Amino acid sequence: MSKHTFVTIGILIGLVLGAILGEVLYQMYDGAVPDGWLEGLSFVGKTFFMGLLKMVLIPLIASSVLVGVASIGDPSKLGRVGFTTLFYYFSTMLIAVVIGVVLVSTIHPGGDFDLALRDEAVTEFEASGSTAQQRVGGASGTGLWGAVKNITSQIVPSNPVAAAAQGKMLPVITFSLIFGIVLIVVGEKGKPVLRVFEGVFAAIMKLVEWILYLAPIGVLALVAWTVARIGTLNLFGPLSMYVVTVIVGLLIHGAIVLPLVLWAFGKTNPYRYMWQMKDALMTAFGTDSSSATLPVTIETSQREGGVSKKSAEFVLPLGATVNMDGTALYEAVAVVFLFQCFGIELGMTELLIIVFTATLAAVGAAGIPSAGLVTMVIVVEAVNGSLGGDKVLPLAAIGIILGIDRILDMCRTTVNVWGDAVGAKIITRIAPDDEHAQPG
């Protein structure tokens, strides 16, 4: 058995055993799993395993983007690659949002929602003082213009070093992109700097390969922690139709739309490629973070998926920050569902606002667990502004879906990473490595 096969089987076993362990704990303690268990699982999964992945994230992004830009070389070709990449990202996110809006409007999962349960969830969320409640409160009042300013401030960072220290990816990507172009322009004087970053990138990828050996244990702990807090049976409770709507939407986009896009523009068997990317997809599901999965996505796409070095090093880091197909779809479904729960009918104008703002908000969503909950505030407030009057949705309504958000987040993160991988494979045809002119 090769080491890569060992890791793949290990991650799969970790996912299954984690779900079983989490459900056993949930049933054993009747939903009130002791803090000792939860803290232990969180330490192994979050503090240790995800900590290792996040440890390499900033140096990986800086070196991979810089080296990727330099390897593309010709600035005109870089512009073509960049434009195509962004066009793909925004197009697929827009398609995902439209799918979500159509599904939730057709299925109407919030139409018959229990009013007593709704009001109880809202009241509990308002009084909880939880981290999620504080984040939602802090995001209120920003509106659509606030989202635009947030994205712009990240694209044009005043201090890229400080942004890196805070773990912000988009400012690091922007600075690395510009710095890489400058190193190309200065010619021979920039080559020693490029060689340093090439060495950094090679070392980081070797470190990622070592960290992957711990993936089965880390994934087991993370999944067990999630299920122990929520319980799988809650997926079939009052929110079951909402859960079905989100998952069906993600399946349509991830298993039909993105494969069709890859087949049409990447000239690749999409389901074979999906199998080749299984390590990254399973890691995304287990870690619930597209950012933490990025090192695995880069490594797997080149080793198994045949993605060019140029494409993987440029497209994937950008995608982990900008491309959020699953998050965009989820936010559209969630917002319309919450308005349905409060009996607020949305017209075509409000639905179009949701399509636009959910796409934009998804771009600004951090690649961390449950970041979509915070950016959802932007979408809700944009719709409230359109409705006006007393018929608006309270932000505390987000508390209705908070309990099962983590499990759905695991699903949408998997679609986020799959969308990144599809984009990298398509861009490989535009920016192949020298040794293979037209990869298939």
Image (cartoon, grey):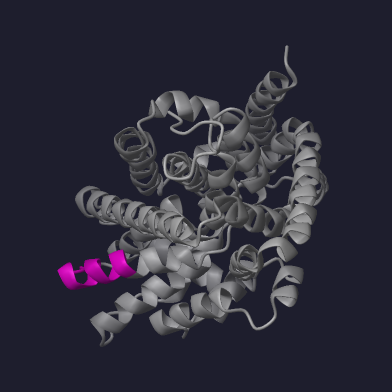
Q: Main secondary structure of the magenta part?
A: helix
* The C terminus sits in image quarter: top left
Residue 79: x and y in percent read 44, 61
Residue 401: x and y in percent read 46, 57
Of 243 and 428, nearer the camera is 428
Residue located 48% across and 58% down the image? 78
When asked about the image quadrant of residue 224, the answer is: top right
Question: Which contiguous range is marked in magenta?
Answer: 344-356
Mark yes or no: residue 120 visible.
Answer: no
As drawn, which residue projects farthest toward the top? 1
Q: Is residue 235 above or below residue 397?
A: above
Residue located 32% across and 79% down the image? 384
Residue located 74% across and 42% down the image? 205
When asked about the image quadrant of residue 231, the answer is: top right
- Magenta span contains residue 62: no
As drawn, which residue projects farthest toward the front? 188
* The N terminus sits in image quarter: top right
Residue 336: x and y in percent read 31, 62
Of 384 and 266, nearer the camera is 266
- Magenta span contains residue 347: yes
Q: Is residue 58 above or below residue 159?
A: above
